[in-house]
Image (cartoon, helix red, strand yellow):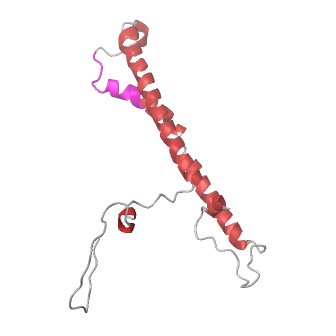
Amino acid sequence: QSCVLKNTRWVAGLVVYTGNETKVGMNKRDPPSKWAQVDQKISDLSKFVFCFQVLIFCGLGGVGIATKYIWTLDLFYLAWPAVQPFYDPIVIPARFLLLTSVMIPISFKVIVDISKSWISRCIQWDLKMVDDQTQIGAIANNTGIAEDL
């Protein structure tokens, strides 16, 4: 932090304390996140579901590879090709990834955002939320206002 003095010939100063307990030192922190609680919950649940999804596709992909290469290659009625493609161990887990990709629906987040926007519009249109003195209605500047009420 710094300051600039202008239009002075000289200055006498005394530094008493410089550290993290001063006003400047305490304001160095990053500002807190201003997410709505619903958005934080959705984010946390999405992270959990994604980790669960990775476990599922890795586990079931491993089972699929083991099933194909250990137990079923010698079964004549499955008619596997004599030489397996090099990408086959990648394709089997990728199939499970595609099967589990619907576990985190993007539409849920979109519906929550649309609902919050609709609620903030309803607050603005509410005729009962008018200041008696100024006759000005409620103004919703953000969509997280419903959580604050």
Quarter of the image where the C terminus is located: bottom right
Residue located at (42% from left, 12% from top): 78
| 125 sits left or right of 87 in the view | right
Quarter of the image where the N terminus is located: bottom left
Q: Can residue 106 be seen in this view?
A: no
Residue 114 position, x and y percent, is 61, 59
Residue 118 position, x and y percent, is 66, 63
Quick check: 79 above or below 149? Answer: above
- Work out which residue is located at the far left of the displayed protein and give it: 9
Q: Where, by quadrant of the figure, is residue 5 drawn? A: bottom left
Q: Where, by quadrant of the figure, is residue 59 drawn? A: top left
Residue located at (45% from left, 23% from top): 60
- Bounds of the magenta segment: 83-94
Quick check: 61 above or below 9? Answer: above
Quick check: 116 above or below 85? Answer: below
Residue 122 position, x and y percent, is 71, 67
| 68 sits left or right of 145 in the view | left
Residue located at (41% from left, 26% from top): 58
| 92 sits left or right of 107 in the view | left
